[in-house]
Image: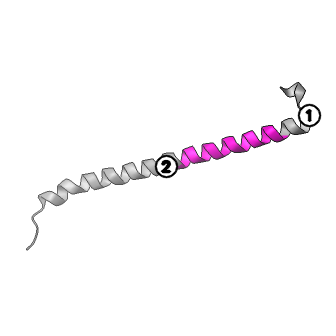
Amino acid sequence: MYSELHHENYQRLHDAAKLQAQALRRQAIDAFWYQAGRAAAHAFHALRRPTALRLPREA
C-alpha cells in the first residue's frame, strides 16, 4: 500500500489515523471515569440508605 501512495498522501492518512486513535482513547477514558463516578455515587448512596432507614424519624 505504501508504494502505491505518494509520501505526502501516506503521511496525511497516517496523521489522520493517529488523531482518530487519540480521540477514541479520550472517549474511552472519559467513559471509564464517568462510569466509575456513577458507580462510586451509587455505592455511597447504598451505604447511607440502610443507616437512614434504621434511624427513628422524628414526628
Magenta residues, start to end? 12-30
Quarter that holds the C terminus: bottom left
Disc 2 is placed on an element classified as helix
Residue 52 located left or right of residue 26 = left
Residue at point 43% right, 52% down?
37
x then y, percent, for residue 23: 65, 46
Q: Is residue 8 magenta?
A: no
**Residue type highlighted by circle 1:** His
x then y, percent, for residue 53: 15, 58
Measured Cα–Cα span from mark 2 to mark 1: 41 Å
**Residue type highlighted by circle 2:** Trp
Residue at point 73% right, 40% down?
18
Residue at point 85% right, 27% down?
2
Q: Is residue 7 above or below residue 36?
A: above
The tag on residue 6 is 1
Picture colour scheme: one colour
Q: Is residue 3 above or below residue 48?
A: above
Q: Nearer the viewer, residue 23 or 2?
A: 2
x then y, percent, for residue 55: 12, 61
Q: Nearer the viewer, mark 2 or mark 1?
A: 1
x then y, percent, for residue 33: 49, 49
Mark 2 residue crowding within 10 angstroms, few (<14) / some (14–19) / many (20+): few
Q: Nearer the viewer, residue 56 or 13?
A: 13
> Outermost residue, front direction?
4
The tag on residue 46 is none
Earlier along the polypeptide chain: callout 2 or callout 1?
1
* Mark 2 and mark 1 residues within 8 Å of each other at the beta carbon: no
Residue at point 89% right, 27% down?
4
From the image, tell me which residue sits under label 2: 33
Residue 14 located left or right of residue 34 = right
